[in-house]
Image (cartoon, rainbow, N blue to C red):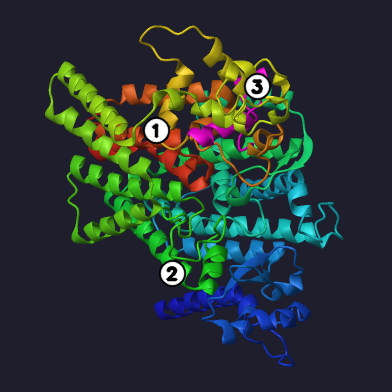
Amino acid sequence: MLESKKQIIFLTYGLLILMIVGPWIFNGNSGEKIPLIIEESSIGYYQTNTCEFSMGDILKENLFNREVEYLPDLNSKMKCHGRINGVDSSPEEIKVYIGTNLNIDLIIQSMTWLIFLTLIPKTKKKNFGMSRKIIPVGAVILFYVHMNGERFYYEVFSREFDLALSINNFFILSIMASTFFISIIFQDLIQDRFYNLINYFPYIFLIIGAYNSYNLNFFLLILSIFGIVAIIERKVNIKFTSIYVCLSSIVLITFEGSNKLFDVDKLKGFSNSSETISSIVFWIVAFYLITSGIVFVINENLPHIDLKLIRYNFLMAGCAVFIMGIISSISPFINFMSYYYFGLNKLGMNTLQSVKGNTWRGIGASAEALGEFYAFCIIFTIITSYFYKHKITRTELLLICLNIAALYRTNNAAAVISGLALGVLYLLDFKVQKLKNKLLILFLLVLTTVLSFVQITDFNYEYASRSLLYEGMAITKIDTELGSNEIGKNAIDNSNFGEILLLDTSKISSSLLFVTKFYTETSDIKYIPNPVALVSAISVPINRSQKWGVFFGKYNPTVSEFLFGYGPQQINRYYLNFNTKINTGLVLPHSSVLSYLVFFGITGVLVFLFYILYLLYRHRENRVYCLLSIFFLLNLVKSDSVLYLQSFTLMVFVVNFYKINKVVKGDKDE
């Protein structure tokens, strides 16, 4: 009986894997045409014979061809999925476009990630109760509302896109049916593994879950499902819900739609591409559901937390991301396969060389976000091993070394410095007893660091205090109104902001206009630096002067939008609604604080800040929680990592870690 069960499982996995890889391997030509080595001389041959050869066909001749780059072609018919749908030459390499299709992507990628979920060891069964009937319907409704709201995104590349609810519309019926059955399979699969989810969640940094053809993420749907369960079981935070509903209501009341399409690029799956009422409703609901879903999973998993296992999985996930980045950079074919099956936001790097000689992101979308993750893996392991008396094993020591190597490649100085700062805070807390001595030593350390930096870099405060305003004005379209002096420099070049304010200020964003007036018109107080000058001066050594200057140059909110934001994941309105010299590509705020200012306004940012400070004060005796939270807060100022679902999940995990500490320490710290 046992042997028969194993055979059934083996056969099932075999059929699933065959279904997943089949379209790439067995979808080739009939043998009438022969695949050639892809090079300059054969480009015309492949351009003539589009949709003829599968990847399996061309790999026979091009498996080790390093001169090509495989890219997904979203604008493909179903019959061309997995086939070569175009070849173009570029100065760097030959670009080979592989056909992909909306309907097939949904099935193949979802089934792949469901198979990955089966690798999580089983625990006792979670009873979803009445949620079982609601979850599939809720998933279908969410999916439909999303596609309806972001129809402009899909109409760009999908020839068959049609959302009409008709029995003759097989396009939308197939998507809804696939979503329905995938959610049912997920329910049956996860109920035996639910209480192990937190122990294995670090692997979402390896399996990103972004669909190739959708501006959606597999884990966003999963967490939304858990959010629905939390609502049904009445296990949501009432205070959070009340505040969120109030802020969201104001956003919806003041919302003005447009037909502008935002290229989500590497934010695919966790950012809105459109400005329609349906899209903003979807992201408001989705953000609430995934936040509630993460907290629900943490709360329900508390009795089953295995801190040693979480620690080990963090290190393993960090190493796996690093190693897969190396492997993907060696082979163009593996690079494409890792992009597709891991659900990457964008293709991984196809070289081991760093970008501009300093950063290397591997398969990640952001070197900065990955650097934070690697640093967190190291810090989490060291802190928990000390405070909970969990000895670091030889295997973990090796994994730490690999994570250090990965952190070094990302060149995330902020993550390294904040980690060292935690070490200083720890030593002060435990080795120095009197509070006044702690403050004195901390002040001297900060003063020494600042003076050393000024000495080494020849830091010029006068220049640094105006650099942020200069960068903001530099991208503002006011050049034509500015005269030049005898050496060809205008008011921007000379940082003469008072002269600029005399011009037509309608061309200057409301935020840049405000900080410029505050800088030029506010009377200075002796020994107290101007707040704008201080922020600008700080931005220079942390390499954020230009990035934050661009943010203020583009951020043009009304009073209501400044107070309450544009809505969650609404980068598009910030980026496209005010015309500057930078209106193409993807230029992010480069600060999670500024990103959340865009999403939730100053009200939302202050509520979040006060909540974190409240938790830190309430759990101030919980050293692990405080240190991890401080590390994350320091990095949120400089990094926009929470724009990625994985980093956002990690942030919510850290914010709620005091609950895990209570379980591990048996309430001793409370």
Tell me: residue 466, above or below residue 170.
above
Q: Main secondary structure of the magenta part?
A: helix
The residue carrying mark 3 is 510
Choose between 353 and 655: the one closer to the eye.
353
Q: Residue at x 52, y 79 (%)?
A: 11
At label 2, which amino acid type do we have?
A: Ile
Residue 75, located in which quarter of the rendered image?
Answer: bottom right
Q: Percent from the top left, x then y, of residue 351?
A: 47, 66
Which type of secondary structure does the marked residue at label 3 adopt? helix
The residue carrying mark 1 is 633
Find out whether the residues at labels 3 and 1 contact each other: C-beta distance under 8 Å.
Answer: no
Which type of secondary structure does the marked residue at label 1 adopt? helix
Q: Residues within 10 Å of mark 2 (few under 14, many from 20)?
A: some
Q: Residue at x 45, y 76 (%)?
A: 5
- Is residue 614 at least partly visible in the picture? yes
Dot 3 or dot 1, earlier in sequence: 3
At label 3, which amino acid type do we have?
A: Ser
The magenta segment: 545-570
Residue 420, located in which quarter of the rendered image?
Answer: top left
Closer to the eye: label 2 or 3 = 3
